[in-house]
């Protein structure tokens, strides 16, 4: 059976790397390679968390991994930043385009 210290020693470099990458709040500003690395590390952290839970490594390690996995999830799956320009484009371009594409249904509804 693997011990707590051995488990942490083998994996802590990846955990630290993810911690450093999560310092930047704006994921949409990062290069694609960095985003891919964050996603890969997120999957590794989730696997490490499940492994730590199944081995009974300790509440402090699983708590740290749980917080780290949560932060990575929130960064990766956060919605795009709200832009007022998108609302303007919907009103000026999107709605009229949809209205013209479905004019028969609109006529029937009127």
Image (spheres, rainbow, N blue to C red):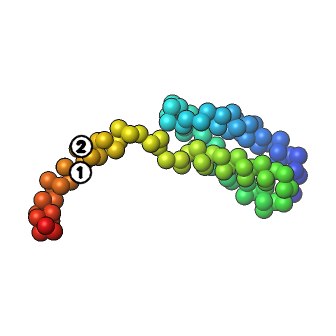
The residue that label 2 is drawn on is: 92
Residue 4 versus residue 10 in the image, above or below: below
Mark 2 neighbour density, 10 Å: few (under 14) some (14–19) many (20 or more): few
What is the x, y in percent for residue 20?
69, 33
Outermost residue to the front: 110
What is the x, y in percent for residue 72?
63, 45
Q: Is residue 64 left or right of residue 102?
A: right
What is the x, y in percent for residue 87?
34, 44
Q: Is residue 101 left or right of residue 66?
A: left
Mark 1 neighbour density, 10 Å: few (under 14) some (14–19) many (20 or more): few
Q: Quadrant of the C terminus?
A: bottom left
Residue 33 versus residue 92 in the image, above or below: above
Q: Is residue 34 left or right of residue 17?
A: left
Helix, strand or loop for disc 1: helix
The residue that label 1 is drawn on is: 95
The residue closer to the viewer here, 36 or 80, is 80
Q: Is residue 79 visible?
A: yes
Helix, strand or loop for disc 2: helix
Q: Quadrant of the N terminus?
A: bottom right
Q: Quadrant of residue 104?
A: bottom left
Mark pair 2, 1: CA separation: 7 Å
Residue 37 versus residue 49 in the image, above or below: above
Q: Are marks 2 and 1 in contact (CB under 8 Å)?
A: yes
What is the x, y in percent for residue 48?
73, 51
Which residue shows up at 31% across the image and 41% down it?
A: 88
Which residue shows up at 51% across the image and 31% down it?
A: 29
Image label count: 2
The residue closer to the viewer here, 57 or 2, is 57
The residue closer to the viewer here, 103 or 22, is 103
């Amino acid at each position: 059976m693997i011990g707590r210290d051995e488990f942490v020693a083998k994996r802590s470099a990846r955990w630290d790397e993810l911690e450093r990458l999560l310092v930047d709040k704006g994921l949409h500003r990062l290069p694609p390679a960095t985003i891919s690395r964050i996603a890969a590390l997120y999957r590794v952290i989730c696997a490490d968390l499940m492994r730590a839970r199944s081995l009974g490594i300790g509440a402090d390690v699983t708590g740290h991994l749980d917080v780290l996995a949560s932060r990575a999830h929130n960064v990766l799956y956060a919605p795009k930043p709200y832009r007022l320009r998108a609302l303007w484009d919907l009103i000026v371009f999107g709605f009229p385009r949809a209205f013209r594409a479905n004019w028969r249904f609109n006529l029937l509804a009127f």
